Image (cartoon, rainbow, N blue to C red):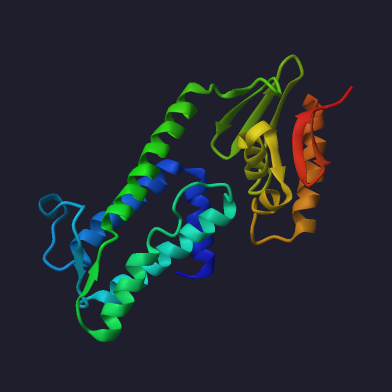
């Protein structure tokens, strides 16, 4: 996995906790089947020590290192996360040792790895439950949105509506819409289009703000971030 691919995977996980949980569970199942020597998760139990087999270790190691890079990228995008984003590191080190020595290596971190994945699954379920409770409306902005194909319709109470189009305009608006209190830090703002320069995104912010002002919304620079808000009277 290239650095660009790791960033893309990390960003997808940030946007969808459910996908993160599903990917980690699938990877854990893959580990049970391909890393440990004559071991089955259901029959052996996760509390005992496991033996890391050197057989196809090099190939598995490449996969786990790629996952580790994506988890690091996830953590970079959400520094406050409580997830054990280095959960694969102990197993990666054991695999490296097995590959280098061409001999089995005892591994006692399976319980911790399983607990880390379960914690993410529980957190993802809570996030999904909260998302289901929140209507498609922001009371802070007195605004509703509706996505139709490649267009986004933004409506504000008594102020009409506008249609947003474009590969930057829509992701930019949705990033602010989903952010806590509709505010993004400077770093988070720059992640809207990681391949772009700050000046390019700033021009898009200005153009988007010009459109939003038609329905009395604005994007303003505020401290170390950018804020989507109702136009000040």
Task: Residue at 37%, 37% (x, y): give it.
Answer: 122
Task: Residue at 11%, 66% (x, y): give it.
Answer: 38
The quarter of the picture where residue 172 lies is: top right
The quarter of the picture where residue 96 lies is: bottom left
* Quarter occupied by the C terminus: top right
Left or right: residue 50 versus residue 11 is left
Q: Is residue 172 above or below residue 89?
A: above
Left or right: residue 27 versus residue 221 is left
Task: Name the residue nearer the viewer: 8 or 79.
Answer: 79
Q: How many marks?
A: 0
Farthest residue in the top direction? 158
Task: Residue at 79%, 51% (x, y): give it.
Answer: 202
Q: Is residue 228 above or below residue 81?
A: above
Q: Position of residue 69 (x, y in %)?
A: 47, 65
Left or right: residue 186 versus residue 104 is right
Q: Position of residue 46 (x, y in %)?
A: 20, 52
Q: Position of residue 40 (x, y in %)?
A: 13, 57
Left or right: residue 44 versus residue 205 is left
* Quarter occupied by the N terminus: bottom left
Q: Is residue 177 above or below residue 46?
A: above
Task: Residue at 64%, 58% (x, y): give it.
Answer: 194
Farthest residue in the right direction? 233
The quarter of the picture where residue 170 lies is: top right
Task: Name the residue nearer the viewer: 50 or 143.
Answer: 50
């Amino acid at each position: 996995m290239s650095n660009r691919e790791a960033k893309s995977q990390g960003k997808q996980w940030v946007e969808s906790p459910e996908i993160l949980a599903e990917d980690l569970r699938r990877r854990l199942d893959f580990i049970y089947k391909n890393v440990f020597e004559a071991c089955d998760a259901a029959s052996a139990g996760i509390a005992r020590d496991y033996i890391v087999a050197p057989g196809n270790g090099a190939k598995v190691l490449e996969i786990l290192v790629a996952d580790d890079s994506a988890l690091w990228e996830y953590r970079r995008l959400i520094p406050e996360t409580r997830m054990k984003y280095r959960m694969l590191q102990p197993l990666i080190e054991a695999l490296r040792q097995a590959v280098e020595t061409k001999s089995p290596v005892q591994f006692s971190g399976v319980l911790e790895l399983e607990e880390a994945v379960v914690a993410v699954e529980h957190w993802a379920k809570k996030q999904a439950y909260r998302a289901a409770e929140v209507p498609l409306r922001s009371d802070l902005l007195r605004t509703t949105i509706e996505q139709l194909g490649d267009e986004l319709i933004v409506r504000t109470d008594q102020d009409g509506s506008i249609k947003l189009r474009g590969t930057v305009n829509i992701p930019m608006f949705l990033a602010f819409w989903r952010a806590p209190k509709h505010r993004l830090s400077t770093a988070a703002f720059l992640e809207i289009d990681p391949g772009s320069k700050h000046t390019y995104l700033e021009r898009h912010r200005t153009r988007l703000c010009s459109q939003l002002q038609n329905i009395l919304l604005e994007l303003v620079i505020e401290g170390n971030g950018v804020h989507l808000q109702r136009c000040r009277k």
